[in-house]
Image: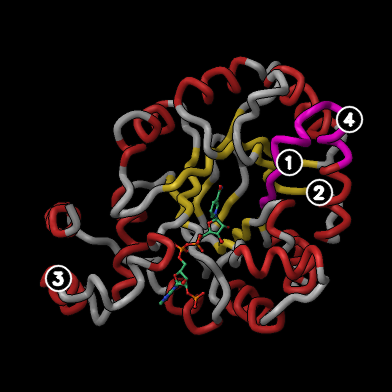
Amino acid sequence: MSVRVRLGKTDSEISPVGMGTYYDPGWLVSSKLLKITPNAEKHISAIRAGIESGLNLIDTAEIYGTENLISRAISGFDREELFIATKVWPTHFSNDKIKKSCERSLRNLGLKQIDLYQLHFPSRKIAIKETMGAMEELVDQGKIRHIGISNFNLAQMREAMDALKKYEIVSTQMHFSLIRREIERDLIPFCKDNNISVLAYYPLGHGKLSSGRIDNKPIFKKIEEIHGGKTVPQIVLNWFLSKYDFVFPIPRASDPDHVRENAGSIGWRMTPAEIETLEKSLE
Ligand SMILES: NC(=O)c1ccc[n+]([C@@H]2O[C@H](COP(=O)([O-])OP(=O)(O)OC[C@H]3O[C@@H](n4cnc5c(N)ncnc54)[C@H](OP(=O)(O)O)[C@@H]3O)[C@@H](O)[C@H]2O)c1
């Protein structure tokens, strides 16, 4: 049985760990401009390995150039079991452009409905009331299921919440990891109080926390021994799950073996003392 956790105040159930699908700037440029997608088959295998390992949360964005790839990766799986999140870029935040972006993402993903539609970054140009009005219309039309945001600070988040009339923000996506914990000061307590989920991007520190560079810390060896051979990436991802029940790390899914390994961060829990030692070892 796959582990599922409720997203915010919704009735949607998602895996405690998701799959990110932003590869790198080179991939983005070559896929968009040259229509060449290096390692596409490997990325597709990675996403499929994740689904087979119990992960159902897949994150993308219109700007990543990976919506088509996801469409191919999820083909053959039960749509109802999957939770697909994408994002709209701020230059498309006007009422008409956001609707066009949404249609394009639906087409690229091969879906009738996007489970979570996120505003990628706050816009300095388009009033949030206009954008959120369009997002609410998209929910009413059944094109998107839930509204999310990304990279909004607390003040911007409050403003975005106030701009909604009928629906609520269910999640925010933020840079968050064992070595990037600023949001624990304000956003995390606010999200906890308001039952808003947090999708943690760069959960492995964009690779800094998945490499051999940190596994010389004695605490990793200790946790590995106590919890039955857990690896460094599994410990780093489990930190989110042991500490919070509303934070969902979304490590990049590009290598099937890594994705399977990352799925092994689910289903076990570190003690508060282990969490504290782990945090101190990386300060
Ligand atoms: N909202 C935003 O503005 C925003 C911004 C940036 C990123 N994101 C999202 O966050 C996702 C994650 O970001 P990210 O991919 O840059 O950072 P990340 O997941 O923290 O780190 C990815 C790096 O870790 C490696 N890795 C993953 N699992 C591993 C394992 N088990 N063992 C060893 N290495 C492992 C990857 O290598 P392999 O590729 O070889 O597995 C890659 O080099 C993106 O894909 C995207 O969906 C969102």
Q: Tell me if label 1 and label 4 are in contact, CB under 8 Å.
A: no
Label 1 CB-ligand 1 distance < 8 A: no
Say the numbered circle drawn on residue 113.
2
Instruction: Indicate whether 21 appears above or below 128.
Output: below
In-front residue for pair 61/188? 61
Range drawn in magenta: 85-100
Between discs 3 and 4, the one toward the N terminus? 4
Left or right of residue 143, residue 122 in this image? left
Q: Which residue is mark 4?
A: 96
Tell me if mark 1 has few (under 14), some (14-19) or many (20+) residues whose alpha carbon lies within 10 angstroms of its own.
some
Residue designated by label 1: 145
> Which residue was labeled with disc 3?
217
Q: Position of residue 240 (x, y in %)?
A: 35, 54
Query: Up-down: is 276 above or below 19?
Result: above
At which x and y percent is residue 132? 72, 24
Tag 4 secondary structure:
helix
Residue 80 shown left or right of residue 155 in the figure = right
What's under tag 3, amino acid-wise? Lys
Q: Residues within 10 Å of mark 2 (few under 14, many from 20)?
A: many
Above or below for 226 versus 118: below
